[in-house]
Amino acid sequence: MRRIAITFILMLCALAIFAQGSTEKATVAEEAKEFSDIRIGYIVKWLGNTFWQTYEAGARAAAEELGVKLDVFDVDDETDFQGQYETAMNVVNQGYDAIVAASITNTNLIPAIAAANKAGIPWIVVSEDQDQSVLDMYDATVTCRCRLSFYDEGYIAGQYVVETIGEGDVAIIEGLAGTSATNDRVAGFKDAIAGTGINLASSLPGDWDRQKAYEVASGMLQANPNLKAIYALNDTMALGVVPAAEQAGRDIVIIGDDGTKEAFESIRDGKMSATIDGVAYQIAYYSVYAAVKAVVEGVDTLPDYDLTPGLITIENCEEALAVAPEPVSEMYEINKNIYTIEGLE
């Protein structure tokens, strides 16, 4: 009788262990299902620019790896800040679990950020930083900023000019006026050349547009026969400078910014001299991890991440071309993912 009782107790224990194991498996299965149901809305500027295509590639790679759903949204050009705001509000109203956004200006999406806050939707900032005073005005907050320093990009460009030409007149073709991408890159460049033999002879807007940059560069070259270098604040504009210099018969140093494949090809072909690699693929990839981390861990804030930009010249453009749209291996050593998700390491 005692043996039967012991056997019965052992059977109950086995059933309990089996039931516990089954429950654990069910819980894991439920969590996995919930994880796969996460929807991320990813807002960029204009996908006609290959730089933003690189963002899309990095974001989609991370979404596929994590098994989450990702929808990418853009507008018709990089100056359509009202259209981007309307797009962002639609994304908020569609009930995405998290939103990642590269705003055109540092204020145009802040009302949408406030709406996302009210809906409990995490908002990850990439590219353009947000104006804190306007965030405060709308009582809006962001979950985190996953981006690089535009100032550092400009500083690296300035250092490259100093090291390459030593002294002489240079010019800047700016992006859209009033954006932190424009202001900070210009500030970084100016600080890098301060106290050197480099003289900033001209700094005019090109509005991120290739044709306008071509026209501005043509005027600069005609007005200043001693101009030795032009720093265009994105690759699209730098590629517009190239034919302007060719038509003027001028051999000048042309530096772009963003790190696009077309710029790498231009460097390889001896037309552009360098570009600042904005590590767009890494930023986009890590920002999706940040969005998912915020959702699955239920946190309101995450650490900000300022990634380090790189420099692409004739020395490493072949590697850059071979691995594009991903950055060169050096940048993976410098910039690692800080948004690891518990249970996925």
Image (tube, rainbow, N blue to C red):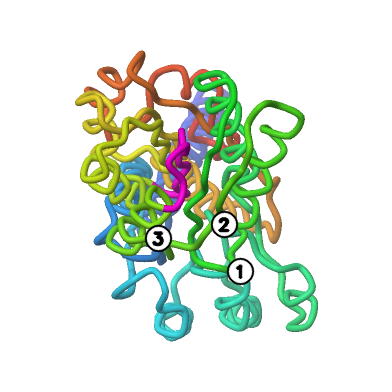
Q: Earlier in the sequence, mark 3 or mark 1?
A: 1
Instruction: Give, as a three-letter code, the residue at label 1.
Output: Gly
Position of residue 152 relative to residue 79, above or below, is: above
Few, some or many residues within 10 Å of mark 1 (<14, 14–19, 20+): few
Quadrant of residue 148 within the rendered picture: top right
* Label 2 close to label 3 by CB (< 8 Å): no
Instruction: Give, as a three-letter code, the residue at label 3.
Output: Trp
Numbered tag placed on residue 208 in the rendering: 3
* Label 2 close to label 1 by CB (< 8 Å): yes
Q: Is residue 252 visible?
A: yes
- Per the rendered image, the range of residues in magenta is 223-234
Between residue 171 and residue 132, name the one nearer to us: 171
Numbered tag placed on residue 11 in the rendering: none
Q: CA distance from mark 2 to mark 1?
A: 7 Å
Residue at image mark 2: 182
Across and down, in percent, residue 195 comes to 76, 29
